[in-house]
Image (cartoon, grey):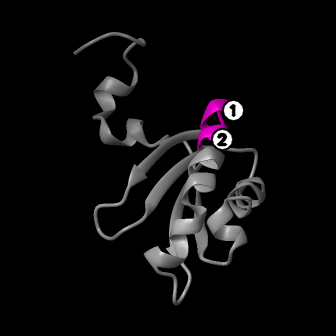
Amino acid sequence: MRILCLDKPAPGATLEKYLPHLTAEAFHAWSLYKSGVMRDIYYRQDRPGVAIFLECESVEQAQCLLADFPLAKAGLLGFDCIPLGAFTNWESLFAAEFKSQPEGATP
């Protein structure tokens, strides 16, 4: 299951409080990426922070992995985890006459 994980800085968290943990944070992220669990990580454009895509069996598994980040262990960061699934509503976008077309056929 693909899970979108959005960081939530703890109240009172500052860059100064983050600094001692950032190297360990990067190593932990790298280990998740190498293992294939972390699929993508992006800097947020609306505020400082990250958006992470994990591939996990459940939201609970994702939460356990995220709790191992050094900033989370230090109580400086949490995450909202949003489970995502395949968009299966494509057919409703097409006209009825195309729904019966063989796969790969073009109108």
Q: Which residues are magenta?
A: 30-37
Q: Secondary structure at mark 2?
A: helix
Residue 36 at x, y percent in the picture: 65, 32
Distance of label 2 from label 1 (alpha carbons)? 5 Å
What secondary structure characterizes most of the magenta part?
helix
> Disc 1 designates what residue?
35
In the shown orientation, is residue 59 left or right of residue 98?
A: right
Residue 31 at x, y percent in the picture: 66, 39
Q: Identify whether 105 is placed above or below 45.
A: above
Specify the amino acid type for callout 1.
Answer: Ser
Question: Along the line of sight, which residue is nearer the eye, 42 or 76?
Answer: 76
Which mark is on residue 77? none
Q: Residues within 10 Å of mark 2 (few under 14, many from 20)?
A: some
Question: Along the line of sight, which residue is nearer the eye, 84 or 96?
Answer: 84
In the shown orientation, is residue 2 left or right of residue 63?
A: left
Q: Report the residue at 53% width, 71% height from top.
A: 18
* Residue 33 included in the magenta stretch of the image: yes
Question: Along the line of sight, which residue is nearer the eye, 78 or 105?
Answer: 78
Q: Secondary structure at mark 1?
A: helix
Quadrant in which the C terminus is drawn: top left
Dot 2 and dot 1 residues touching (CB under 8 Å): yes
Q: Identify whether 86 is placed above or below 20.
A: above
> Disc 2 designates what residue?
32
